[in-house]
Amino acid sequence: MTNFYQPSGKFSPLSIVFFIIACLTVFPLLGLIYAYAIWYIPIPYINFFIAAGFGIGVGYIVKHFVIKMGKVRNPRLAFFFGLLGALVALYFHWAVWADLVINVAESYGTEDIGIAVSNISFIEVFALATQPGALFGLIGEINKYGTWGIGGGGAVSGIMLTIIWIIEAIIVIVPSIMGRSVDANKPFCEENQKWFEEKQLPAFVPVHPNEVVEHVSNGNIDFFEQLAKVNPDHNSHSVFTLYANATNENYLTITNQIAGTNDKGEIKFEESPVVTNISLQEDISNILEAK
């Protein structure tokens, strides 16, 4: 019978401690950097990429500091940490950004593009961050009048500005939560309380899901010995990720990367999952590691 790894659903209480620490230190810092970046780069289209980078940064902290160090083996909790982390970081961003609006000094530029010089007062930011009612009330007032426009037009405000803010929030939240459940679903040894060692093997030819499950179930080492390597830069290939630990348990995850071309003729790869965390016999694991 073929077995697949199933997370225990457990987590260390330290994960909550680590998350609180991140909420009080790293997330406010990321929010500060993000607020200043979009304030002094007055190009809305570029700001969307900055927002995505902000979300990726939050997701990185949640993945490595909260989930990995906090030993979170509960995919739902991992997803929640990613979502709440993004919301906390966004909240601190709003406190900083609103204070930048309050402290605007001079403006430079043309009718089409310009920069308003401003700097925050940390006391004011702290006051706004600790008084949600005052913060959201101020944001509501800013929404009525707006702070920027496009192409020399009037300031964007009201419903249109609200829609832009919602889109911005989604762009931040999505990369923060993306993959967090997968992180918590990776093999973890409950006996020694450690994550399995993760090893990515060289690129092989694409494989079929049913074929892999059948050969693993039957312990067919010939199939794995004969796997041919390919150049992953230009050819369709499969990515083998091997998980192993000191108790000689082994799991294997495989995805196919199917090569194609875009409208510009550039090679692009489409990811297709093959099998996730299938239990692997030690002799097959040794063969794959030898490759």
Image (cartoon, rainbow, N blue to C red):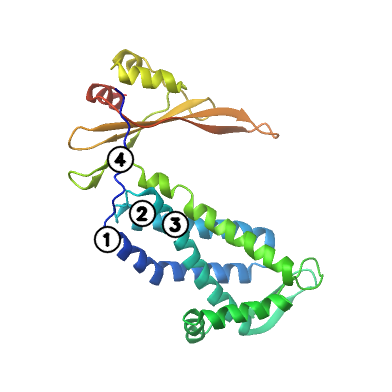
Q: Vertically, is 103 above or below 212?
A: below
Which-is-in-front pick, marks 1 and 2? Answer: 1
Q: Is residue 166 left or right of residue 90?
A: right
Label at residue 64? 2
Gap between marks 1 and 4 measured at Cα: 19 Å
Label at residue 13? 1
* Corner quadrant of residue 220: top left
Numbered-mark total: 4
**Tag 4 residue:** 187
Which-is-in-front pick, marks 2 and 3? Answer: 3
Q: Position of residue 38 (x, y in %)?
A: 61, 67
- Give SS at disc 3: helix
User: In this orientation, which residue lies closer to the viewer: 203 or 162?
Assistant: 162
Disc nearer the start of the sequence (1/4): 1
Which-is-in-front pick, marks 4 and 2? Answer: 4
User: In this orientation, which residue lies closer to the viewer: 128 or 48?
Assistant: 128
Q: Amino acid at mark 2?
A: His
